[in-house]
Image: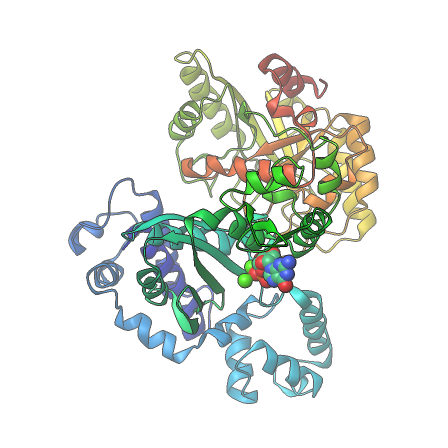
Amino acid sequence: MADPKHDVLEMLEELATLTTLDEGDVQSFKVRAYETAARGIEAHVGDIAHLTAAQLQKIDGIGKSTATKIRELLDTGRVPKLVELREKFPASVVELMKIQGVGPKAVLKLRAELGVQSIDDLRKAIAEQKVRTLKGFSAKTEEKLGQTLARMGENIGRAPISVALPLAERILGTLRDLPGVTFAAYCGSLRRFSETIGDIDICVVAADAAPVMDAVVALSMVDRVLVKGATKTSVVTRRGIQIDVRVVRADQVGAAMLYFTGSKAHNIKLRQRAIARGWTLNEYALAEAEGGKVIASETEEAIYQALGLPFIPPVLREDSGEIELAEKGALPSPIGPVLGDFHVHTTVSGDGRSPLEDMVEGARARGYRVLAITDHAEGTLSGVGRDALLEQRARIAALQAELTDLTLLHGAELNIGSDGQLDYDPEFRALFDFCLASVHDHFDLSREQQTKRIVTAMRDPSVKMIGHLSARMIGGRPGIDLDVDAILAAAEETGCALEVNGGLPRLDVSVDVMRRARDRKVKFVLTSDAHHQTELERVRYAALNAERAMIGPDRIINTWSKERLLQWARHKSP
Ligand code: DGT
Ligand code: CA
Ligand code: CA
Ligand code: ZN
């Protein structure tokens, strides 16, 4: 097993989902138990593979029956309870729970009374107006469901990047461990860092392709095999995600990665450049059209260079002007080192999972110069009262006394109320070094109200940054309705920055909003919104997203000098 901890977490998550269905209740005691156990495992430092069931039970949140299941998974790879639940609830039924507003009770009812076994079945049932005949449903709820399905539209069947990326990394871990494998990487939309992923494409270089193909079909998450060929295998996971793995030759891996990274539109433009030079470009090589002499194939850089272009980062390969910019040598500069994080939680927030000391240690390990501790303020469900915050301030001051290079800022993530009101009072807020403010509720207000509440928060002197502007969850909740231009104008006018949240379910602000801000003097901050020490690394996802939107380092506050950074944190001005 490549990463036992990851496998255990995945099992607990699957057990929680399936048990939700089995019990018909999201709040069921058993579901909670799996979720608590997952948090315990996640927070556990050190190897879990060698722990006995009794030792596992000593980890916070793990009871006897969960400990037994973990051992079953680690020892035999087969957990009878999981097998039983999977038989009861096939993947297509579980998928119904992804629809917003459809809970376990509704899934069970739709299945028992209308025989709905998949999203397609549900579409049909809605079209035939059968759903409204069920007890607890009405014509109105049926219509709403139809609208939700329509809105999910082409994203249905696509996996959010928060699911696809960890899955892909896990598969790569397994493949890289195989003897004879010298290279394994994902390409496709995942490498371009798209928000949703149709399927996961992986390229592998190996001495012998057969063991790689065998390993792919033997992956623990595989539900069914679509194709198993000599060099290409496609499988579908139990969560319905397709994975295409191709074994390619070492001297052709550049051409393969370029081709399978896409996008298709980017590839077509490149191929046109090749043709104009009397060459061909495919997944094997850039070569002369006549005679087939290879010009470049081993690296992407060599192929771009032969085509008269600098290397184009994968996140830009959408044919949205990147080739033209590359040709002129005008691609935006890469985003330089990040000097610090401005959105970080600790165990003082109800939902934080690492103590202050660990978060500070994590920041130090990353070489940060600045770290703002921003636990949830009292207006949020998991928020903190004044006394606890003052106590935290004293702890931060004590830690600061031991630090030389790293400056700690004490802050809070304020909640933006429905009218733009903020937590505490202006005097108390003025005592913070740095506050961000974010929307955590009232998602259904009108565009006008949503815009107004955020602009009101931006104008408050204590608010230096708006956190996760739209409050969306990719693959889950849609963002709030906003007049983006009005928000951008207010950001320009007030100097209030917009957060580029690197949490994968959020990635908020979106690339789309950043693109619309390109011609304005809006400032951005890359953050991790870490609730655990290990999540500090998510700041790199924020950087990738800023890169996708072609936002240069001059607009990203936490790549500036430390002096300038602190000045902004205190006064909202550069
Ligand atoms: P997805 O999977 O829908 O999120 O998006 P992609 O971009 O990963 O698309 P996919 O998996 O169908 O194909 C992977 C890459 O392979 C794609 O980005 C470009 C390349 N590719 C696939 N089919 C074609 C094709 O017909 N022509 C060209 N030029 N490239 C193709
Ligand atoms: Ca793909
Ligand atoms: Ca594919
Ligand atoms: Zn937060």
Residue 379 appears in the figure: no
- Residue 243: image location, x then y, percent: 47, 63
Q: Is residue 250 visible?
A: yes
Give the quarter of the figure containing the C terminus. Answer: top right
Looking at the image, how many numbered discs can be counted on the residues? 0
Q: Is residue 495 left or right of residue 357?
A: right
154, 416: nearer the viewer: 154
Q: Nearer the viewer, residue 227 or 52?
A: 227
Q: Position of residue 508 (x, y in %)?
A: 64, 44
* Relative horizontal placement of residue 272, taking residue 118 as reference (left or right): right
Q: Position of residue 558 (x, y in %)?
A: 60, 25
Viewer-closest of 228 and 19: 228
- Residue at 32% across, 70% down: 82
Q: Is residue 168 above or below residue 305?
A: below
Percent across and percent down for residue 396 are 45, 20
- Ligand 2 occupies quarter: bottom right
Kindly indicate the quadrant of the structure image that contains residue 260. Answer: bottom right
